Amino acid sequence: MKRHFLFHLTVLLPVLLITACQSGAQTRYSAETEERIKQVENNLGDWVRTQYDTIWNLEERMKHHNIMGVSIAVIHDFKLDWVKSYGWADVSEKRPVTEKTLFQAASISKSLNGVGVIKLAQDGKIDLQADINDYLTTWKFPYDTISKGKPVTIAALLSHTAGLTVHGFPGYAQGDTLPTIQQILDGKKPANTEAVRSFIEPGSNVVYSGGGTTITQLIVTDVTGQPYHEYMQKNVLDPMGMKASSYMQPPAGSESELLATGYKPDGTPVEGKYHIYPEQAPAGLWTNPSDLGRYIIETALSFNGKSEKVLTPEFTKLRLDPVMQDAALGVFVAVKDSSYYFSHGGANEGFTCYYVGDVISGNGMVIMTNSDNGSLSAEVANSVATVYGWKDYYKPVLKTVVEVDESILEKYVGQYEAGGSTFTAKTEGDKLLISPYPGIWVNVYFTSDTDFFVRESRDEMKFVTDDKGIVTGFTASGTMIRKIQ
């Protein structure tokens, strides 16, 4: 998953004048279900609400965020309630998104990988608490002094508590020479990422590591003697009914006509339509919302002792049991008063997606887009939660926006720096804008002369001055971003 300090996956971008067409060959539902779909399409909301906000609809938000295509599945009471698709799988080909269109699941791949790895433990072939080198035969993890003699376990890899490097992967363009998994793990050419090594002591904190997940991919192949995608197809995807999905890079045969083309934030397609990810376990799954909905339903049923197509209820509960903070085995969990959510998001080159399920209510949703801009997913998720009455999912923060005198705004103009990232602030009329990326500007909303927020981040922000009233920087949830000019 790609990240940027302060502004993560939700950068506001210029609008392309595309039409959010509703694709042909959509499934027709009952009048009651169609009404719920209509409500979801017309109740999109942000994490924050001000006195000036109105309720958004899906079509206008797709245009606003430059989203070429989106596909949505909603699960209600342990059943797939509806699936609907919008926009284009490929704009130049005028190929619409359909319910069968396949998207790159990106880091959601880690959730299904977790199921596959845990099945090996369920079958008695591995011990999740054992040293990973007990099962690695074609490569060994090179321990050093950072690990302080503590073993890296398989459970730690799945829960991001192994303390390893390499957050995520950029993938490889069509025609690039692909590295082996061993080359990826050692950071040797043609791999395009650094070696996967210890960053902090195992078990000391949650450090998100796609590199660690890649090690589990090698464990699967070393233990089973099978290609990773074949093991996952036979033992996880097919038994769950996810027969349209595949970890093959890319899916072969007629399925290639179903693959969505990825798009950059400015609306241009990814060169070659999409990237290739030999790092299959952390980033390589091609799937659609219908299939991911089946995974959510099976997880919830198994948790409640009503199914075991892949994992028994005992091992499903183990998978959803937090190891540290909100990190479980291939998923992140949030336990509320009346719900037990499991979820994961994902962002590959040209794709973003998100799913969440609740094992108590049997509710859930999947949102997949062929865009680098992740803003829409959260807005759709908020709408689904509102329409379906999820009591403890979406609670927008209410803020009152105030006008700030232009003379004060001018004091905030300049460049700021933190953690190697540079931010530029400028005025435009009576507004202040901040640029987290070259060419990208986001609006600043003030709640006082110094306190502010941006819709692209949930951070609490405040401009800071010295005892002479000179602006020295701004804080974002306690982190100081210093003014450098």
Image (cartoon, grey):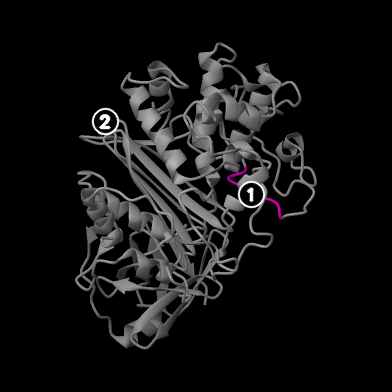
* 170 part of magenta stretch: yes
In the depicted structure, whether residue 60 falls above or below residue 259: below
* 95 or 11, nearer to the observer: 95
Q: Nearer the viewer, residue 71 or 186?
A: 71
The residue type indicated by label 2 comes to: Ile
| Relative horizontal placement of residue 180, taking residue 166 as reference (left or right) | right
Residue at (47% x, 68% y) in the render: 66
Could you say which disc has been placed on residue 244 in the image?
Answer: none
Residue 124 location (% of width, % of height): 55, 11
* Region rendered in magenta: 166-173
Local packing at callout 1 (Cα closer than 10 Å; few below 14, some 14-19, many 20+) is few
Residue 281 is at least partly visible in this image: yes
As drawn, the label of residue 360 is: 2
Whether residue 250 is visible to the viewer of this picture, yes or no, is no
Q: Is residue 139 left or right of residue 291?
A: right
Residue at 68%, 25% in the rendered image: 221
Residue 207, magenta (yes or no): no
* Of residues 446 and 369, the one drawn nearer to the viewer in this rendering: 369
